[in-house]
């Protein structure tokens, strides 16, 4: 079957040969179906719409067209023998993950719909396809495409507007963090940054330094967990020539290198008690003593300590000096984890995509909706660092200009599969049980029963009944809660 094309009225003159022209104002649609009547109906039904309509009954011809012309929407019938290919939709999305694939089927059921959407379908329509529903769906896709484009523009603008000293965030937690850094940066001598691994403590430390009076001075970092105890003292305070075997020259320590600036002590909870005692003396007197030297040297250094550990608990366990803790924690700043600031996820995604696209020389435009949904569901135990690694991996191996789930690391793909299980026969349950499961899920996501009841349009009494497994009584939708 030769691919047939229906051009919008007035688009080209009748005496001209067909020339395919990429026009973003016109939606390009491909329908793949053995049912010639259905194809004819789609061609004739959309003749007056601003849609380029192409039809074929040959799956391979359809795939070739997708590869060459990249239509925005593809209608695929998966119920006829020749087209009953479970990989058809997967192959389309491998060519271009940004395509909206709509499945057409004569026997619509929840299990098929869930399985199809899980694999990347945008929607399922029952045959014979209603032209009115199809038009509504095309308008919806067009509207979503425009919104996504506008959203990308807005995110680029927001990324610039909500970038604070190299830190990106617009959530209330991050705005409070930015405000706190601005207030303490001009005055601090010591500060303690708390937060999980990968939250961006070093970026916060650099922000404190850049906004401080010593911003023109050096910013030096020392990872306390990356060096053995016997060498830590030497790295921090330096040594004199001949002070020990191998000390052939004088060596200045990091405190001297940071003189007139800021020293960041990352993972300070890993320092031994002996080094903690010497560090406390430096913080108190602002004087350092090199190993093997009887003399002390005056230094002017602001110290920022950072850790993911609970120092209060370590003080109680006597594994961290309480006097050092209180010296450091005069200014205590907590960096929120990524799973508490999901509002920042889209900005961070856009930032990393642009950065890696430039680094790898790839025209990455964005992520598919299912890829965005997976990133939104994932708990991010590794925080910003993990997000950066995931998107860096995806940009590196992506073959097209849109990142999809199959571009993510394997453990992320497995998480996506585990979080959206297919509905098996033994999972089919009553309507009341489905309601109870749904209410539980809403409460879990919102984290507040009163707000969940408001979102569901039911009273708190009804919500509690449902959570306890009791049947929900019929009630009018409420705008508040009881």
Image (tube, grey):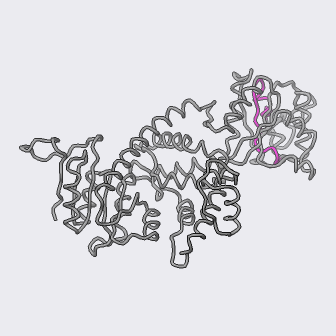
**Relative to 435, is 384 above or below?**
above
**Relative to 347, is 372 above or below?**
below
Q: Is residue 165 left or right of residue 374?
A: right
Q: What residue is drawn where x is 45% and y is 51%?
A: 368
Q: Is residue 305 left or right of residue 373?
A: right
For residue 265: magenta?
yes
Q: What residue is drawn where x is 86% and y is 42%?
A: 244
Tell me the quarter of the image containing the N terminus: bottom left
Q: Nearer the viewer, residue 220 or 192?
A: 192
Count of numbered tags: 0
Q: Nearer the viewer, residue 188 or 297?
A: 188
Indicate the position of residue 279 as horizontal and vertical percent values: 87, 37
Indicate the position of residue 206 as horizontal and vertical percent values: 69, 32
**Relative to 312, is 62 above or below?**
below
Q: What residue is drawn where x is 92% and y is 50%?
A: 316
**Relative to 336, is 422 above or below?**
below
Indicate the position of residue 254 as horizontal and vertical percent values: 77, 34
Q: What residue is drawn where x is 51% and y is 51%?
A: 372
Q: Which residues are magenta?
A: 249-270
Q: Nearer the viewer, residue 468 or 404?
A: 468
Residue lying at the far bottom in this picture: please name it: 426
Indicate the position of residue 38 as horizontal and vertical percent values: 23, 64
Q: Is residue 290 left or right of residue 412?
A: right
Q: Nearer the viewer, residue 15 or 279?
A: 15
For residue 435: magenta?
no
Say whether residue 238 is visible.
Answer: no
């Amino acid at each position: 079957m030769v691919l047939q094309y229906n051009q919008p009225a007035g688009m080209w003159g009748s005496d001209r040969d067909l020339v395919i022209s990429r026009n973003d104002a016109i939606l390009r649609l491909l329908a793949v179906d053995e049912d010639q009547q259905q194809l004819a109906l789609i061609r004739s039904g959309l003749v007056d719409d601003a849609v380029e309509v192409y039809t074929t009954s040959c799956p391979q011809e359809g795939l070739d067209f997708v590869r060459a012309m990249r239509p925005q929407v593809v209608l695929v019938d998966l119920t006829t023998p020749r087209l009953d290919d479970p990989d058809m939709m997967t192959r389309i999305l491998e060519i271009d993950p940004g395509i909206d694939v709509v499945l057409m089927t004569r026997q619509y059921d929840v299990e098929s719909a869930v399985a199809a959407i899980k694999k990347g379908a945008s929607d399922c329509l029952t045959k014979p396809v209603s032209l009115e529903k199809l038009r509504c769906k095309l308008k919806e896709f067009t509207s979503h495409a425009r919104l996504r484009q506008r959203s990308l523009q807005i995110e680029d603008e927001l990324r610039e507007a909500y970038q604070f000293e190299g830190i990106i965030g617009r959530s209330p937690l991050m705005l409070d963090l930015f405000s706190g850094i601005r207030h303490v940066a001009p005055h601090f001598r010591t500060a303690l940054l708390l937060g999980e691994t990968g939250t961006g403590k070093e970026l916060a430390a650099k922000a404190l330094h850049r906004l401080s009076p010593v911003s023109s001075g050096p910013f030096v970092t020392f990872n306390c967990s990356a060096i053995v105890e016997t060498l830590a003292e030497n790295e921090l305070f330096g040594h004199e020539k001949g002070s020990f075997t191998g000390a052939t020259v004088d060596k200045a320590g990091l405190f001297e290198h940071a003189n007139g600036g800021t020293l960041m002590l990352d993972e300070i909870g890993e320092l031994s008690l002996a080094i903690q005692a010497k560090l406390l003396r430096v913080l108190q007197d602002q004087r350092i003593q090199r190993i093997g030297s009887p003399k002390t040297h005056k230094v002017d250094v602001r110290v920022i300590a950072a850790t993911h550990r609970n120092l209060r608990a370590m003080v109680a366990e006597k594994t961290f000096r309480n006097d050092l803790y209180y010296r450091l924690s005069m200014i205590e700043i907590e960096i929120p984890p990524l799973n508490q600031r999901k509002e920042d996820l889209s900005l961070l995604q856009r930032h990393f995509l642009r950065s890696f696209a430039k680094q790898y020389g790839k025209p990455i435009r964005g992520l598919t909706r299912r890829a965005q949904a997976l990133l939104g569901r994932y708990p991010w135990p590794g925080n910003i660092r993990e997000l950066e690694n995931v998107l860096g991996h995806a940009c590196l191996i992506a073959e097209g200009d849109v990142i999809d789930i199959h571009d993510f690391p394997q453990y992320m793909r497995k998480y996506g599969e585990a979080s959206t299980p297919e509905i098996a026969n033994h999972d089919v349950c009553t309507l009341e049980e489905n309601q109870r499961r749904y209410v539980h899920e809403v409460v879990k996501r919102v984290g507040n029963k009163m707000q969940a009841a408001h979102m569901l349009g039911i009273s708190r009494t009804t919500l509690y009944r449902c959570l306890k497994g009791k049947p929900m009584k019929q009630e009018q939708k409420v705008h508040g809660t009881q």
